[in-house]
Amino acid sequence: AQKVTQAQTEISVVEKEDVTLDCVYETRDTTYYLFWYKQPPSGELVFLIRRNSFDEQNEISGRYSWNFQKSTSSFNFTITASQVVDSAVYFCALSSMDSSYKLIFGSGTRLLVRP
Amino acid sequence: NAGVMQNPRHLVRRRGQEARLRCSPMKGHSHVYWYRQLPEEGLKFMVYLQKENIIDESGMPKERFSAEFPKEGPSILRIQQVVRGDSAAYFCASSPRQVAYDGYEQYFGPGTRLTVT
């Protein structure tokens, strides 16, 4: 069975602090994809990143970085020098051959960045 | 290239009425997925459709809910005799192929927020 756990329900930081959002996943498949989506207060879902299971290279995009570790089944997301506009709910998601087309979402982490 | 379109963005229905939610996938996308987000929760898969076919409706409640994706026109998610527990955000996503193959991400629409009074 596939499962995504985001243990942090809510995180509050002060602007310019770094913050890491945790994501732990479960799957028996060897081929799978991991995703992060951002849901700002306006409600839409914004795609941030996709990573396949064969690519463990960490990725950096501006102030965003992702740490994929198969050994611990984790795909953590770090925001460096956070800004108020980063305030949102962030979802980690998984798809695999077993789920074939469904995205399995975690419950989300609400990030509040205070000025 | 227009994104995934959903309408209406907000829908208010009284208990017992019908709700129809529409989704137009991105151009060139023939795979549509519906997800439901209950308040303060993550998204849960409901149904996966290709043109004129329901591929998987395992996440859809057995009664009152139905979905279609006709040859022409948008995909429709229909909820009959709505109840207060149906109040949620309903998101549609589309992809050019099944997500697992080549890892195509699903592109999400802005969602329809259904409120049942």
Image (cartoon, rainbow, N blue to C red):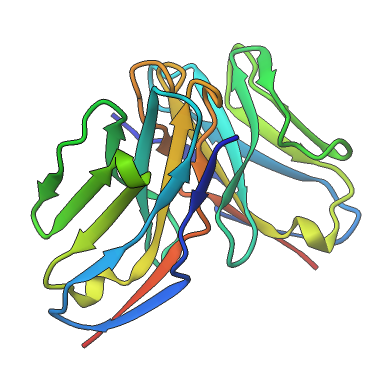
* B57 is higher (above) or lower (below) than B37: above
Residue B24 is situated, as x and y percent measured from the top left of the image, at 51, 30
Residue B31 horizontal side relative to residue B104, left or right? right
Q: Residue at x 22, y 49 (%)?
A: A67
Residue drawn at point x = 27 percent, y = 44 percent: A69
Q: For the C terminus of chain A, which image quadrant?
A: bottom left
Q: Quadrant of residue B76?
A: top right
- Give the answer, above or below, for where B117 lies relative to B83: below
Image quadrant in which you'd find residue B88: bottom right
Residue at 11% from the left image edge and 49% from the top image edge: A61
Q: Can residue B8 be seen at all in this image of the molecule?
A: no
Quadrant in which the N terminus of chain A appears: top right
In depth, the one of A27 and B72 nearer the eye is: A27
- Determine whether, in the image, residue B113 is placed left or right of residue A111: right
Name the residue at the left extreme.
Answer: A62
Residue at point 28% right, 29% down? B1
- Residue A92 seen: yes
Q: How many marks?
A: 0
Q: Is residue A103 above or below residue B113?
A: above
Image quadrant assignment for residue B79? top right
Residue B82 in picture, x, y percent from top left = 84, 52
Q: Where's residue A74, x and y in %?
A: 34, 48
Above-or-below relation of B101 to A91:
above
Q: Position of residue B66 (x, y in %)?
A: 78, 32
For the residue pair B70 and A102, the one nearer the viewer reads as A102
Front in this rendered view, residue B4 or A109: A109
